[in-house]
Amino acid sequence: MNIGIVCYPTYGGSGVVATELGKSLADRGHTIHFITYNRPIRLDLFSENIFYHQVRTPNYPLFEFSPYESALASAMVEVARFNNLDAFHVHYAIPHASVAFLAKQILKRYRLNIPVITTLHGTDITLVGKDKSFEPVVSFSIDQSDGVTAVSDFLRKDTLDHFHVERKIKVIPNFVDIDRFQRHDKDHFRKMIATQGEKLLLHTSNFRKVKRIGDVLKTFARVREKIPSKLLMIGDGPERGPAEAMCREMNLCDDIVFLGSQNAVEEIYSIGDLFIIPSGSESFGLSALEAMSCGVPVISSNAGGLPEVVIDGETGFTSPIGDVDKMAKDALSLLQDDKKWQIFSKNARKQAEQFSLAYIVPLYEDYYQKVVQQVGKKVIA
C-alpha cells in the first residue's frame, strides 16, 4: 500500500511510534510518505520505500503564530495528488486529525476520496483534548476519521467517556523492536558509570510535570539510603531544570547523571537494573516497554495504561500515584535479591515479546486494508 504518515517528528511517544511503524511497513514492501515539519528523529536510515515531505510554514508579520495547520493541509493534498496515496495515517489528534479532515475535503475537488486513519496516543486525549477550547474539534475530527485506533484499552475507554464520539475505536497497542531492544553485553560501559559496582536505576521521559520527575528522585533517594546506587536520567524538557535543582537540595548530584536526549537508548537500558516510571498519566508506557525488552524490570505507578504493560509482581511492580515509599520498597526487594531480579528480568523480556513489531505491524496492515476497502480510494463523480 501507499500510505501518508503525519506525525510530530520529536522524541515524544507518538512520533517514535509513527516513525518506527513507517520504517517497518517500508521493510514489508509498502511505500511510506512522511509529512511533517522536520525529519523525524528516528528516521535515520535510507530506504527506497520511504519518502519525506517537509512542511514549510511561511512567516508573515501579519501572523502572531505561523499557520502550520494550513500549510500541513496543503502539503497533504499535494502528496496525495501526486503520489497516488491509498490512505493517510495521522498520529495524535491535535491538530492532525482536524487537518486531515480539511485535506480530505480539498481532495474532493480533484475527485479523490482518500481514507483517513487517526491514532490516538495519550495526552492528545487525556490532557490537551479535554480542554474546552479543543473538545468540539477533537470529537468532530475523531468522528470524521474513516478509522480510529488507540494504543491501549485505557485510552479507548477514556476517549469514549470524555468525548462525544460515535466512531468505533480499535485498540492496537504500541510495539517494540525486540531485535534492537535486547540486552547486550555493555559491561565496559557499566563500569565507566558504576565504578564501585553500584546498582543502576533508569528513567526516560520528556520531563513534563505529568511524568512526576520529583517522585523519581525521591524513590531513588530512598533506595540509595539502603544500597549503593546511581540514577541515569534520559531525556529533556521543562522539568529538567527543577529536577537538577532538586538534586542539589537533596545532595544527590554525585550519583545522578542527566544524559539528555539519546537515540541509542537500548545501549543504556542494557546496563540498567531497574526502570522507574511514576507518571501521573500514561496512556501506554512505551519507554517502560523498551526497557522491559532489554530485560529491565519496571517500577511504575498504576496510571492509565501502565498496568497493561507492566504485570505487577511479575515484570515489575505498580503502585498508587505518588506512593514513593512503596516504589522504593519494591525496588529494594528486587535489587537486594539477585535470584528474584533474574526471574523478573526474564519475565519482562517475555512480556515485551508480546508487543513485538512482528505481531503488531500486521494488525495495522489488516486495519488499513479494512478501512480502504470500506471507503475506497474512489473517484468522486
Image (cartoon, rainbow, N blue to C red):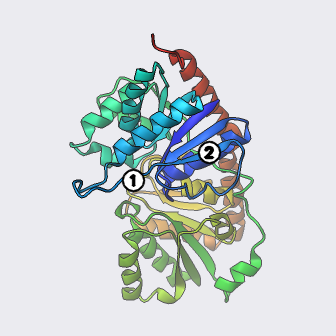
The spot of residue 157 in percent (x, y) is: 40, 35
Q: Quadrant of the N terminus?
A: top right
Residue that appears at 45% across and 41% down = 75
Q: Is residue 76 above or below residue 221?
A: above
Q: Is residue 288 above or below residue 304?
A: below
Q: Where on the picture, by quarter, is residue 354?
A: top right
**Residue 346 visible somewhere in the drawing:** yes
The spot of residue 228 in percent (x, y) is: 59, 84
Q: Nearer the viewer, residue 19 or 298?
A: 19
Q: Nearer the viewer, residue 200 or 21?
A: 21
Q: Is residue 6 left or right of residue 46?
A: left
Q: Is residue 167 left or right of residue 233?
A: left
**Residue 125 visible somewhere in the drawing:** no
Q: Is residue 47 above or below residue 209?
A: above
Residue that appears at 56% across and 57% down = 288
The spot of residue 311 in percent (x, y) is: 57, 50
Residue that appears at 53% across and 81% down = 257
**Identity of the amino acid at label 2?**
Phe
Q: Where on the picture, by quarter, is residue 73?
A: top left
The spot of residue 337 in percent (x, y) is: 66, 70
Q: Residue furthest right?
A: 185
Q: CA distance from mark 1 to mark 2?
A: 34 Å
Circle 2 crowding by C-alpha within 10 Å: few under 14, some 14–19, many from 20: some
Q: Nearer the viewer, residue 358 or 340?
A: 358
Q: Quadrant of the C terminus?
A: top left
**Identity of the amino acid at label 1?**
Ser
Q: Which residue is mark 1?
A: 281
Q: Is residue 85 left or right of residue 125?
A: right
Kindly identify which numbered label has been placed on residue 189: none
Q: Which residue is mark 2?
A: 51
Mark earlier in primary sequence (1, 2): 2
